[in-house]
């Protein structure tokens, strides 16, 4: 531990002598103790007007003594003697602990990291919703005809159903566009006899499903 003959020496003299023995200046000591430079300069110049309230000064002196390997009692005793000559300054609502610049940097870093993580999460959620429209199994519901096998007497039938408008829909290999709500209709011409109608829907990067309806067209017989 550093020993300094502080008999009849002021706090200013003890402080500056300790810095000289360590070949330090107030800027370097500020980096080592996290005490603002202007407070250390006040110790060095003996300007009590620039120091914070007494409780903070005692804390700073204890930290300085610890860093400089000094007897903290010598600094505190010198301060105790000199404080009697200084203008009174007590702790009050206006006395605030000096801001820790390293803590501020840490808080800023945490804020930046948190914002970046939130941004990445938002992008991933957005992409998940986007890709859900390209992946997976498509869905289709045929509303006309409902049955898989029917017999009709008209040569034209209106095919109808509901699907995802983002999926590709074909009826017997002819593409049919669905409305924004997914509904679709198509007039389909029938040949006499059995007609096979294939409804195919495919998702962009997903699977394809096929629903087949058998429609038998029996022209009405005209009886004379």
Image (spheres, helix red, strand yellow):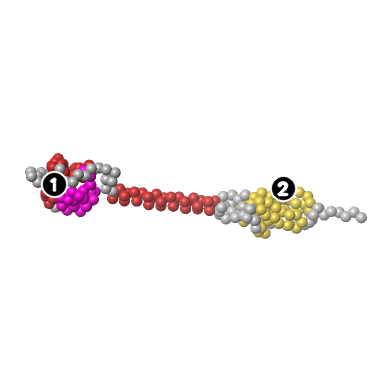
| Residue 121 against residue 77 in the figure, above or below | below
- Residue 18: tell me if it is visible: no
Q: Residue 18: x, y in percent?
A: 13, 48
Q: What residue is rendered at 29% in x and 44% in y?
A: 93
Q: Find the distance from the CA under tag 2 to the CA under tag 1.
A: 98 Å
What is the residue that sits farthest to the right in this orientation? 224
* Residue matched to label 1: 11
Q: Residue 157: x, y in percent?
A: 75, 54
Residue 205 versus residue 87: which sits nearer the camera? 87
Q: Residue 172: x, y in percent?
A: 69, 56
Q: Secondary structure at mark 1?
A: helix
Taking the magenta stretch, the answer to whether it contains residue 39 is yes
- For residue 146, the mark is 2
Q: Residue 171: x, y in percent?
A: 68, 56
Secondary structure that dominates the magenta span: helix
Q: What residue is rendered at 70% in x and 49% in y?
A: 143
Which image quadrant: the N terminus? top left
Residue 101 versus residue 127: which sits nearer the camera? 101
Q: Secondary structure at mark 2?
A: loop
127 left or right of 45 in image: right
Taking the magenta stretch, the answer to whether it contains residue 215 is no
Answer with the quarter of the image where residue 76 lies. Answer: top left
């Amino acid at each position: 531990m550093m020993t300094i003959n502080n008999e009849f020496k002021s706090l200013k003299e003890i402080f500056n002598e300790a810095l000289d023995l360590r070949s330090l200046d107030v800027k370097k000591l500020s980096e080592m103790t996290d005490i603002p430079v202007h407070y250390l300069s006040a110790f060095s110049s003996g300007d009590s007007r620039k120091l914070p309230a007494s409780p903070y000064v005692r804390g700073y002196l204890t930290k300085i003594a610890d860093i400089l390997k000094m007897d903290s009692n010598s600094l505190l005793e010198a301060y105790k003697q000199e404080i009697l000559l200084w203008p009174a300054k007590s702790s009050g609502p206006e006395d605030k602990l000096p801001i820790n610049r390293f803590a501020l940097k840490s808080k800023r870093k945490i804020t930046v990291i948190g914002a970046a993580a939130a941004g990445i999460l938002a992008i991933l959620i957005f992409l998940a919703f986007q890709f859900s429209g390209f992946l997976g199994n498509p869905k289709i519901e045929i509303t006309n005809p409902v049955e898989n096998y029917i017999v009709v007497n008209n040569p034209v039938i209106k095919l109808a159903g509901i699907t995802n408008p983002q999926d590709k829909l074909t009826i017997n290999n002819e593409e049919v566009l669905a409305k924004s709500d997914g509904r679709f209709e198509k007039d389909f011409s029938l040949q006499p006899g059995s007609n096979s109608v294939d409804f195919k829907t495919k998702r962009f990067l997903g699977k394809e499903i096929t629903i087949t309806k058998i429609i038998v067209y029996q022209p009405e017989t005209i009886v004379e």
